[in-house]
Amino acid sequence: MARNLCTGNYAAGYALALAGEANRDARGCAGGAYPITPQTEIIEFLRGFRFTRGRIVPVESEHSAMGVCIGASMAGARAFTASSSNGLAYMTENVFAAGYYRLPIVLVAVNRTLGPPWNIWVDQGDSLALRDAALLHYYTDTHQDLVDTILVAFRVAEDPRVLLPAMVCLDGFVTSHTQMVVDLPEQERVDAYLPPCSVPQRMRHEHPATFGGLTWPRETELHRRQIEQAMQRVPIVLAEALDEFQRLFGRRPAGALVAEQTEDAETLLIASNTMAITLRNVVRERRARGERAGMIRIKQFRPFPRAELLQAIGTAKKVGVLDRNHSPGSGGIFWNEVATTLRERGLLVQDYIVGIGGGDVTPAVIGEIADDLAARTAAAEPLWKEVAV
């Protein structure tokens, strides 16, 4: 592997391209291309890549970009695309369709605030608007995590026990446009890691079939139940994919969640994406001062890692969730999942909505949240933490 100084967008485009090229001896690859800030460089990289057996198709909208992926995947190709913000919103109908067709498409989502009013900076409202689609969600914290997770996402999505699309998310500008040193794998290792893509329900000339036709309620109920069963198999498939990644690449990407200093923690803070990096530094500083603080980084949002969270929570009595997202009338979306998971533990679970629209979530901001959580005797409604922008 070669160490490269590159942006998150470059790293994402590179990983998608090599994953597509790895299917050249099977049915090739394809993807739909439509640019939107701050995702555009990913599409530019893919359009400039010379695939042996593949094509990136420029289209007139994000809806059509996912439509190209659906067509390609139904033909048996490895399919992928990228988008952000209102582009993801426009793509929504076809994201749902891809999941219900059980197509293992990988979508890279560069998190950006939905508008209007128009805002090009990060929050997670765009990707989390898809939380009820038949779609795996992964939230990455570093450039290296992004590259590794894209490759893992293909392996998990295409596994015959899963066969669902996957979305890999990164923070707009914070990750997409900054540079870090990344180990970019050679094509040969990616070839070894990703088996030929096999879509068992793909279209075949010798066996004409109708896709997406009318069904009765009983068939639809069975269909949704099968999707749920596939989601339940993801933890086993993910563990196997991580084992194989470690064997081939010499490092192990994070799994569904990462727990740090939780064994004896009195207070825990939960975050995702790059906020988790800042949170980690705050927790370590507080530990050095003798505070029993801990943290959990949630990487996999769908399927939500309930069993892993229950195991990781340790002895903590107070849990705070940092949400860079907001469901109107309900609070933070990660908090809703965490509170539901911990409902029988009798813990104080407080939501902090922070960094909406790209506000800086600094160590000082997280420190104030940690102080508020430690002083609490009861949870309140979700708290909006104002940050300087």
Image: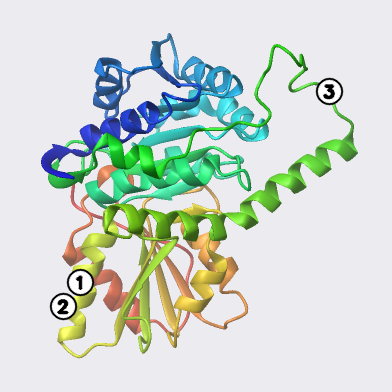
State if disc 1 and disc 2 touch (CB < 8 Å): yes
Q: Quadrant of residue 235?
A: bottom right
**Please, what secondary structure does the residue beneath circle 2 have?**
helix
Q: Amino acid at mark 1?
A: Val
Q: Amino acid at mark 3?
A: Leu
Q: Image quadrant for the N terminus? A: top left
Q: Earlier in the sequence, mark 3 or mark 1?
A: 3
Q: Nearer the viewer, residue 289 or 255?
A: 255
Q: CA distance from mark 3 to mark 1?
A: 54 Å
Q: How is the image coloured?
A: rainbow
Indicate which disc residue 282 carries: 1
- In screen coordinates, is 58 left or right of 6? right
Q: Amino acid at mark 2?
A: Glu
Q: Which residue is mark 3?
A: 214
Q: Position of residue 177 (x, y in %)?
A: 18, 36
Residue count near mark 1 (Cα–Cα under 10 Å), binned few <14, some 14–19, many ≥20: many
Would residue 48 be seen by someone viewing this image from the given angle?
A: yes
Residue 243 to residue 125: above or below:
below
Mark 3 against mark 1, which lies toward the viewer? 3
Q: Position of residue 86 (x, y in %)?
A: 42, 27
- In screen coordinates, is 331 left or right of 367? right
Q: Position of residue 269 (x, y in %)?
A: 35, 71
Q: CA distance from mark 2 to mark 1?
A: 5 Å
Q: Which residue is mark 2?
A: 285
Q: Position of residue 376 (x, y in %)?
A: 39, 81
